[in-house]
Amino acid sequence: VQLVESGGGLVQAGGSLRLSCAASGSTFSINRMGWYRQGSGEQRELVARITSGGGSTNYADSVKGRFTISRDNAKNTMYLQMNSLKPEDTAVYYCNAVIYRIGVTYWGQGIQVTVSS
């Protein structure tokens, strides 16, 4: 499985961005996908995740009500709509995909999101 993120960039506080994660390869095996982020000097943290059918989602408390995770299985793409962005949302955002059967987690290369105050 290969994952490629897009849609990052620089935005002012209060603005919006939509990240995309395009998956290729054995996408039919993916059970769960998610978005993580890592700020400078910080540990990588979960932002949101979604099951293969999209029926179950989880969000970090810090983004609840502002971010929405979704996926389009026909396009093998996952999205993260980010609204009301804050400077503390500045980080490198990574998408991942988990295949339970073989116990493997795949990661994208990461994309920078910078929110200016």
Image (spheres, rainbow, N blue to C red):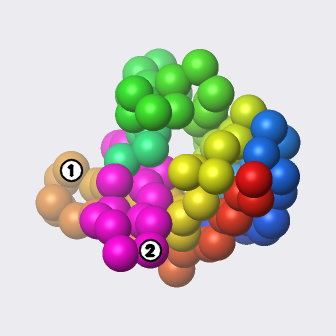
Q: For the magenta stretch, what is the residue range? A: 29-45
Q: Quadrant of the N terminus?
A: bottom left
The image's mark for residue 83 is none
58 to the left or right of 86 = left
Q: Is residue 26 visible?
A: no
In this rendering, which labeled residue sits more in front, label 2 or label 1?
2
Give the residue furthest to the bottom.
109
How many discs mark residues in the rendered view? 2
Determine the residue positioned at 59% across, 60% down.
90
* Residue 41 versus residue 51 in the image, above or below: below
Q: Which residue is mark 1?
A: 100
Identify residue type, mark 2. Answer: Ser
Q: Splitting the image into 4 quarters, where does residue 68 fall?
A: top right
* Residue 25 versus residue 53 in the image, above or below: below
Q: Nearer the viewer, residue 98 or 39?
A: 39
The image's mark for residue 40 is 2
* Residue 60 versus residue 42 in the image, above or below: above
Report, in whole angstroms, how far the alpha carbon at label 2 lies from the one at label 1. Answer: 30 Å
Determine the residue positioned at 70% across, 42% down.
85
Q: Is residue 31 magenta?
A: yes
Residue 35 x/y as whole percent: 48, 51
Determine the residue positioned at 77% across, 46% down.
13
